[in-house]
Image (cartoon, rainbow, N blue to C red):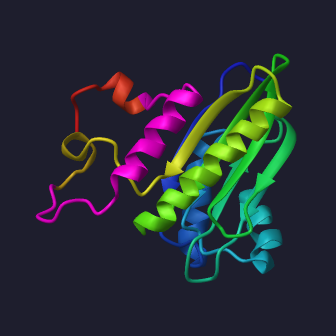
């Protein structure tokens, strides 16, 4: 077990192509201990082969072979997993690990694009996190993925759209509530407060 973990998050926009998946898995193996991957387009039939190609452990939340899906790839020698969490809709998966007897949730999310679905998703996520905090006292939370939502339109988007973001005020309020309730920090924004 380790005190230091390298965690990477990446939206791959599909891993069905063998060469793309092989390259991605090689990249993840060389750069991190835990990879949070979204938009994998994985199905149950892919699990065995993809685990073999990764060469270690993985937890899947499948979408279809054309939509959704997320995976957490991890190096078993680096962490002790005490619980796996999966969503049948291909939107999130997570692991609870112990480091120095401290429980840590590592959650990978791929939130919906549609504002109404996005709102429901963040409510579901809030409820799940509350349940997990009741189950594990002193639970630390690491959440990564594709939220399909930005907190600050000017700083968090690479191109300013001519049309305003269609996410509702409710989505923003739910996101801020999640952040405050569970003491979640945007590590990039904390390190680079004014950088795009």
Is residue 10 at least partly visible in the picture? Answer: yes
Q: Which quadrant, please, contains the C terminus?
A: top left
> Percent position (x, y) of residue 97?
80, 33
Name the residue: 64% across, 81% down.
Answer: 64
Q: Is residue 82 left or right of residue 181?
A: right
Name the residue: 18% across, 43% down.
Answer: 154
> Percent position (x, y) of residue 122?
55, 51
Q: Quadrant of residue 129?
A: top right
Establish if 110 lies above or below 7. Answer: below
Establish if 12 lies above or below 127. Answer: below
Q: Quadrant of residue 163?
A: bottom left
Q: Which quadrant, please, contains the N terminus?
A: top right
Q: Is residue 179 magenta?
A: yes
Residue situated in front as seen by the camera: 54 or 104: 104
Is residue 12 at least partly visible in the picture? Answer: no
Q: Is residue 101 left or right of residue 147?
A: right
> Percent position (x, y) of residue 78?
78, 32
Q: Is residue 16 magenta?
A: no
Name the residue: 50% across, 28% down.
Answer: 180
Name the residue: 76% across, 43% down.
Answer: 95
Q: What range of the chain is rendered magenta?
A: 160-187
> Percent position (x, y) of residue 141?
65, 31
């Amino acid at each position: 077990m380790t005190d230091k973990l390298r965690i990477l998050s990446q939206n791959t926009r599909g891993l069905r192509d063998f060469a793309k998946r092989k390259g991605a898995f090689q990249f993840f193996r060389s750069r991190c201990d835990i990879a949070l991957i979204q938009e994998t387009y994985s199905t149950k039939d892919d699990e065995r082969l993809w685990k073999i190609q990764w060469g270690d452990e993985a937890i899947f939340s499948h979408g279809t072979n054309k939509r959704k899906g997320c995976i957490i790839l991890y190096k078993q020698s680096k962490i002790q997993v005490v619980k796996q969490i999966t969503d049948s809709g291909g939107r999130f998966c997570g692991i609870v690990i112990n480091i120095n007897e401290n429980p840590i949730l590592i959650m990978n999310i791929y939130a919906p694009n549609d504002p109404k679905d996005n709102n429901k998703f963040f409510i579901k996520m809030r409820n799940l996190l509350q349940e997990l905090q009741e189950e594990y006292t002193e639970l630390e939370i690491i959440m990564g993925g594709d939220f399909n939502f930005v907190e600050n339109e000017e700083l968090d988007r690479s191109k300013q759209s001519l049309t305003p973001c269609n996410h509702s005020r409710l989505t923003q309020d739910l996101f801020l509530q999640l952040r405050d309730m569970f003491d979640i920090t945007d590590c990039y924004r904390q390190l680079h407060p004014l950088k795009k």
